[in-house]
Amino acid sequence: MKKAVFVSIALFGLILILISGEIVPQTQLDLPDRSSEFLLRAGFGVMLIGILSLFLYSYSSLPKELVDPLMMDQERNIARMVASLELKGNGVYIPAQGRLREERVYIPAEERPLPLPSLIAEQVLIVGTTGASMGISLIPPGSGLVDRIEKETGKRFNEENLVDLPEILERLSKGSGLTGSINASVKGDRIFLELVHSRFREVCEESWKNDPGMHAKIGCSGCSSVLSATARVSRSPLRIISVERKDRKVRYELERW
């Protein structure tokens, strides 16, 4: 099922490239120049992300020497797409709920926090006439890792209680080896995470070095898996308020929406 979604994402990217009018001038769509450029840039980015995700979903059967470069390529493509589309806002991790059958991370164009648009699973681009209604909606790069852990343990994160978050997130470290350690605390609508990577430490370090701002928008694959699991437990959208990396520790502050 998940592989079919990634194929659909790649095909959707190709369709965006075609309807932008830049590759196929004969398109019948009457698009403004800004929208046409937006679709073209996003199309290439979405297509590449879909293709790379097909490889990354089967990470457990691939050697680390192959997985790490693929993850880095995926993150570089996301960073380039975000930069080319001039998306300024911090990411919001949204668990599957309502019409949204699969979780997403929404990256808005505006830096200031604005109400979330209505999202559906098939939608990747949020295109409107104002910055408040523009952005991208992507499958979190770490969601496949969380899916695998749920399958192996037989426990779903969205069936747990937020008060038990510190113990719940241990599933990502103990047994799976996904992270070295995870500390979590909940204070009102704020969630604080501190994680130390083991399996994907080099990926996180490389991502932070090349595109430090991306951790506030989507995170590296390892960080994304923790954010994805946390959103599932909270059963509510989580906006990234801040993130810092010091002494190999990555600290996130999240806000429940």
Image: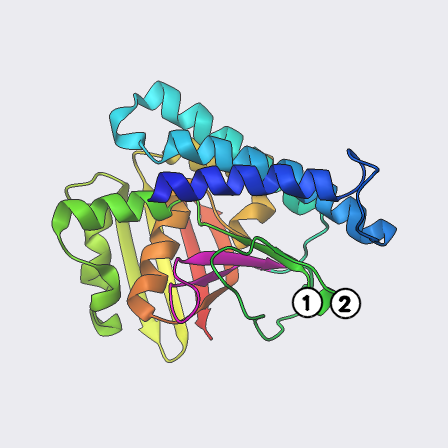
Residue at 40%, 47% in the rendered image: 223
Q: Which residue carries the number 1 mark?
A: 133
Tag 1: residue type?
Answer: Ser
Amino acid on which disc 2 is placed: Thr
SS category of the residue bearing label 1:
helix
Q: Is residue 209 above or below residue 153?
A: above
Q: Position of residue 73 (x, y in %)?
A: 52, 29
Which residue lies under the disc numbered 2?
A: 130
Q: Is residue 84 visible?
A: no
Which residue appears at 24% of the width and 56% of the height? 169
Residue 94: name its quadrant: bottom left
- Pointer 2 with pointer 1, Cβ within 8 A: yes
Depth check, front residue: 30 or 112 = 30
Q: Residue furthest right?
A: 33
Q: Is residue 106 above or below residue 250?
A: below
Give percent across and percent down for residue 182.
28, 52
Q: Position of residue 102 (x, y in %)?
A: 39, 57
SS state under label 2? loop
Answer above or below: position of 54 versus 174. above
Range shown magenta: 90-108
Q: Quadrant of the N terminus?
A: top left
Crowding at label 2, few (<14), some or many (≥20) Cα neighbours within 10 Å?
Answer: few
Q: Is 100 one of the magenta-colored residues? A: yes
- Residue 150: percent from the left, percent from the top? 20, 51
Left or right position of 68 against 132: left
Image point 36% across, 34% down: which residue? 200
Determine whether 93 is above or below 249 in the image: below
